[in-house]
Image (cartoon, rainbow, N blue to C red):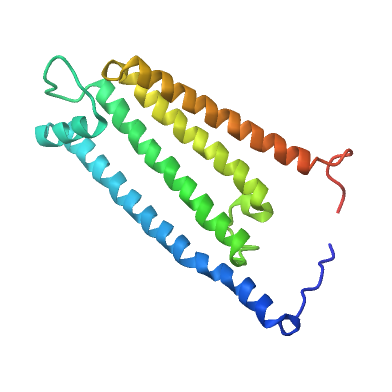
Amino acid sequence: MAHTPLAPSSTLSPLSKLIFASRWLQLPLYLGLILAQGVYVLQFWKELVHLIEAALGNQHALQILVSSIGYKSNTPIEALNETVIMLVVLGLIDVVMISNLLIMVIVGGYETFVSRLNLDGHPDQPEWLSHVNASVLKVKLGTAIIGISSIHLLKTFINAENYSDKTLMWQTIIHVAFLASAIAIAMADRIMHPPSAGGAGEH
C-alpha cells in the first residue's frame, strides 16, 4: 500500500513549526494520567488486602470495607457476607475498568494527537491501536464509560436500601443518557465513515 510522502520539516514556516510542535504541550497531561493510573493500582491493592484480611477475621479491615462501600445494615456486621463481598468485588472491577479507560486515553490519545509510538510488529501491540483515530477513540471511550456506569448502577441496586428512590432514578437516567450518547457517536461515525459496499477490499 503506497504512503503519501511526508513534507520535509525544512519546508515548513517557523509559525507552522511552532503550531505543530505545540502538540507536545499535551505530554505532561498524559504523564499525569500515568501517575493517576498508579494511584488506582495502589487503591486496588489496598481494597484487596482489606478484603483478604476481613475474610481471615480481621474486624478492623471489615469495618473499613463496610465504610468504603457505604453499606448499612440493621444488625452489626460481624463477618463478611455475600452482599459485602459482591460490593467490594464490583468496586475492584470498577477500578480495573477505569484503569482500562486510562490506558485507552493515554496510549490512543498520545498516538493520535502527539506522536507515533512505532509499535508495529510489537507482540503486545493492542489490536485496536493499529487503526486508531479520533473517531475510533471516541467510540471506544463511550463504550468504556457505559461499562463503568453499568458497574456503578449495579452496585447501587445491590445496596438499594441505602439510597433514595430519587437517587436510583437519576442514576438510571444518567446511565441511559450515556448509552444513548454512545449510540449517537457510533451512528455519527458510521455516517461519516460508511463501510465500503463490497466489504473489505483485497490488498
Q: Nearer the viewer, residue 134 or 126?
A: 134
Q: Quadrant of residue 151?
A: top left
Residue drawn at x 41%, y 42% is 96
Residue drawn at x 74%, y 38% is 190
Instruction: Report x, y in % for residue 161.
Output: 28, 15
Instruction: Report x, y in % for residue 195.
Output: 81, 40
Locate the N terminus by quadrant: bottom right
Question: Does residue 57 appear left or right of residue 108 in this picture?
Answer: left
Residue drawn at x 65%, y 63% is 120
Question: Does residue 162 appear left or right of residue 145 in this picture?
Answer: left
Q: Quadrant of residue 83?
A: top left
Q: Residue furthest front?
A: 15
Instruction: Report x, y in % for residue 140.
Output: 59, 42
Question: Does residue 189 appear left or right of residue 50 in this picture?
Answer: right
124 w.r.t. 67: above or below? below
140 w.r.t. 171: above or below? below
Query: How many numbered marks, from 0 up?
Result: 0
Q: Residue furthest bottom?
A: 10
Q: Quadrant of residue 20?
A: bottom right
155 w.r.t. 126: above or below? above
Instruction: Report x, y in % for residue 64.
Output: 17, 36
Q: In this rendering, does residue 65 appear at all?
A: yes
Question: Does residue 174 appear left or right of residue 44 in this picture?
Answer: right
Residue drawn at x 60%, y 74% is 21
Locate the C terminus by quadrant: bottom right
Q: Nearer the viewer, residue 199 or 132?
A: 132
Q: In this rendering, does residue 124 appear at all?
A: no
